[in-house]
Image (cartoon, helix red, strand yellow):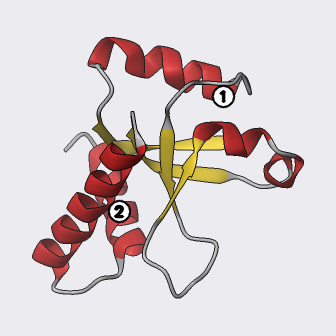
Amino acid sequence: MVVWKEALYVAGIPEKKQKRIMRSIEKKRPVKDVYLLTAPSNENNCLEYVKANQILQPYYRKRDVVVYGLAGSEAAAQELAASMLCDTYLSTGDFQVIPHLERRSGEAGDGS
């Protein structure tokens, strides 16, 4: 199952297409040139980006995929990851990206 965070970072995707792309991903339909920024599978990493079509594989059917960012190309995904990392460091003085993004999403969900 795909879980979209409230405070989703987006790069390289026009605003009009975002919802349509997100619905396609939720319905497990292939999408072209879309990358998801997710929590890393390895605890030593800060973030992970994968092609959206990769989560169609059987491995991901048994797991929740928490998405913190959506990008329209690999280059946009790399820039978005760097931006997320910089935002985290500027806000907290640390590189604990996922806890920061969780707090940020919680604040966005509170109507902030």
Q: Tag 1: Cα neighbours inside 10 Å, few (<14), some, or many (≥20)?
A: some
Q: Position of residue 34 (x, y in %)?
A: 49, 34
Q: The residue under label 2 is which amino acid type?
A: Leu
Q: Please tell me which of labels 2 and 1 falls first in the chain.
A: 1
Look at the image and tell me whether residue 69 can be seen. Answer: yes
Q: Residue at x 45, y 68 (%)?
A: 47
Question: In the shown orientation, is residue 74 left or right of residue 3?
Answer: left
Q: Which quarter of the picture shows residue 81?
A: bottom left
Q: Residue at x 33, y 26 (%)?
A: 13
Q: Nearer the viewer, mark 2 or mark 1?
A: 1
Q: Position of residue 91 (x, y in %)?
A: 14, 73
Query: From what the image shows, is residue 18 above or below residue 108?
Result: above
Q: Which quarter of the picture shows residue 18?
A: top left
Q: CA distance from mark 2 to mark 1?
A: 21 Å
Look at the image and tell me whether residue 1 can be seen. Answer: no
Q: Position of residue 28 (x, y in %)?
A: 74, 27
Residue at the spot of label 1: 26
**37 or 32: which is nearer to us?**
32
User: How many numbered discs?
Assistant: 2
Q: Position of residue 7 (x, y in %)?
A: 32, 45
Q: The residue under label 1 is which amino acid type?
A: Glu
Q: Which mark is residue 53?
A: none
**49 or 110: which is nearer to us?**
49
Residue at the spot of label 2: 101
